Amino acid sequence: MRKTKKGQKMKLTKIAAAILSTSLVFGCGSDLEFQEPTPDPVVETDPGTGTETETTSNLGARILDTTVGDTGELRIVLEDQASVSSILEGQVSATIQLQADADTTQVENAAGDNLTNSAFITLYSSANSSTGTHGEIIIISDGRIRYRDSSGSQQTIEGLTYTPGDAIDVVVAWDETTYSLSIDGGATFSESFESRDPTTVQTVAFRLGGNDDVSTFELNVDDIVILDQTAEVYSDDFNDDVEGDSLVPPYNTSSSEATSELLNFGGEVTEDDAEEVVVDETGVNLGARILDTTVGDTGELRIVLEDQASVSSILEGQVSATIQLQADADTTQVENAAGDNLTNSAFITLYSSANSSTGTHGEIIIISDGRIRYRDSSGSQQTIEGLTYTPGDAIDVVVAWDETTYSLSIDGGATFSESFESRDPTTVQTVAFRLGGNDDVSTFELNVDDIVILNQTAEVYSDDFNDDVEGDSLIPPYNTSSSEATSELLNFGGEATEDDVVEEEVVDETGVNLGAHILDTTVGDTGELRIVLEDQASVSSILEGQVSATIQLQEDADTIQVENAAGDNLTNSAFITLYSSANSSTGTHGEIIIISDGRIRYRDSSGSQQTIEGLTYTPGDAIDVVVAWDETTYSLSIDGGATFSESFESRDPTTVQTVAFRLGGNDDVSTFELNVDDIVILDQTAEVYSDDFNDDVEGDSLVPPYNTSSSEATSELLNF
């Protein structure tokens, strides 16, 4: 189950859900968002009506528990099935669905907990028993979630629930002594729980039911990925299995009643629905609305951690929210003397020792004209160069901090600004969302939703406001220093009203935008887009960083693929190259080779190409690649950074100075094209270069502004 971006509040019709899983979704003022492809649908015909039904299903593991004396189980023993035998610090992620069988009735145990019909994700350490359990998550069939504490008892995770029967993207992360849970695919985690057997994890198990009875439910599991720190050591999407076959083996023989089945995590859609994609874009939900109509104070929503969160202060953490700064419908924007419209600006403020300007750990200022500023260590405002937003749009902000610095993301945490020095470098005690100034009033409103505060990776406070009453003041429960903050129906998707909730709008889903189009039609050179950091980025070299982009390697419409002598189609392959001391093969820090037939390779420390086993892509599809590196190694992700390959040794282990996207070879030409979009380069976590190409002119050469060693790279309309 893929979640929509915070703030979009998008509801899809069933056919939209099926189609959008294999296409690109975009809206006004937003860049492209690439969705992972799903397997081909299964089509069934109703013999009575002739209606064809497409079910968005795919192969996964189905676990039952029909035998007294054992649980249903899918067990992964790392030593036997993964590339490591134990993991000190890592995580397991999967999509799971706990649901009743169609023809059975739910049975409660004596405690009324339905534990018979509950699912367990168990991390075993020294022994595959209760005493050897590193940690365990219990998914109760009625929507509650529990964890097993260090004494072996089950404890309810307060405030964390799911919708019974829904598929959820779970991540269980652990270190030597603790573990924690995410049910939104890793975006937010629970607090950390103490381990019962605090050693390395050796076995991971997905279990259903109990030893003393049977279960009337089924547990469906798909897309299992296990990481050792950031390196993937095991994964299974089950699509290479045969429907109905037992999964024991290849899974450990202690597994029980686990088979490969067609799963339906997406519901049913009919062909008649496929004529158009209909998306409900009303975007209406409850959130905080902040005004500033009083001279002498700002509009404010203030969170004092000691009173409202589970901790009183945070040394290293972050606050995330969706915010929207927009003019009231019946007012006119008023400028101050400097023409900055600060009266109509929003502030996200982190207070340390005192709730005053001198006690400010950090502050972000959202100017109503699209600019963004930060407050420096002297208390002055500084513009963040190169970082803007579309006025009136909802943006997903994340402000992260440590003891002495803070930084900003306006894309939900995917990329962050440089770090800014704190004015009061101590722990953060208060977080405030503010509007306007003390000396005047504002003609704007600040809308805030989906606030989450983390202490390191543990969630300590959150509010989506959906339990509030429309129109009620938010003071309390928010601190009494808050001002003019009420719960209102928010529209982050456009100018919709409550009457629009039942309306539907047809959205153009063509997915066209500007990007780099690279060809290789000349013998003696490759097609190339080259970024020399010293000339184009804010740094000249990077010791530890990453480059991310969306790329598509596809055949030209009027050409035929040509194989080289080895049958590898390297002529039609793409390369992402990190150069260190020289822009040559010997000066290569690392290189990823995208083969046109779906395989992926890397260049090892000797300069030879090696296939990355188990990592493939669908030829012709757009993929979200991330190549990360440190001084001596590099690694690859093709899912936007969610999971990474093992680390590969660098050929030239020094700092990276140049990044290149290349197509084809020097000795021939290519019948393919390489499309590249949304390039972002990070120095550690600070963005030092980015290009989405939307400011370019269609058809123009990209050389310049790209380095003159680039070749056959133009700006084109891309259709991903």
Image (cartoon, rainbow, N blue to C red):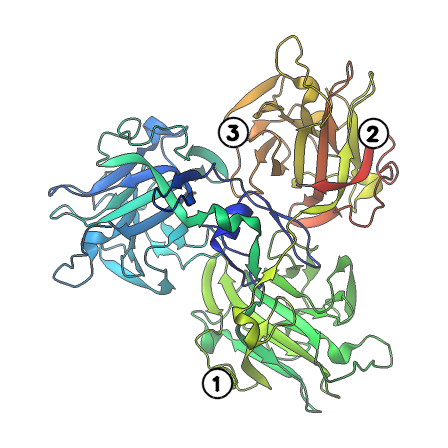
Give the residue at mark 3: 615
| 2 or 1: mark nearer the eye | 2
Element marked by disc 2: loop
Nearer the observer, 699 or 97: 699
Residue for point 70% across, 74% down: 326
Q: Is residue 613 left or right of residue 446?
A: left
Instruction: In the displayed orientation, state which residue is furthest to the top.
Output: 565
Q: Earlier in the sequence, mark 2 or mark 1?
A: 1
Instruction: In the displayed orientation, state which residue is furthest to the bottom.
Output: 295
Instruction: Evaluate if marks 3 and 1 touch, with contact meaning CB atoms under 8 Å apart.
Output: no
CA–CA distance in space, label 3 to label 1: 52 Å
Kind of residue sitting beneath label 1: Pro
Q: Can residue 172 be spotted in the picture?
A: no
Residue 533: image x %, image y %?
79, 39
Kind of residue sitting beneath label 3: Leu
Residue for point 47% across, 35% down: 232
| 2 or 3: mark nearer the eye | 2
Q: Is residue 612 left or right of residue 632?
A: left
Element marked by disc 1: loop
Q: Residues within 10 Å of mark 3 (few under 14, many from 20)?
A: some
Labelled disc at residue 499:
none
Residue for point 88% across, 32% down: 708
Give the residue at mark 2: 712
Residue 70 position by quadrant: top left
Give the residue at mark 1: 476
Q: Can residue 220 be spotted in the picture?
A: yes
CA–CA distance in space, label 2 to label 3: 29 Å
Above-or-below relation of 67 to 612: below
Nearer the observer, 143 or 354: 143
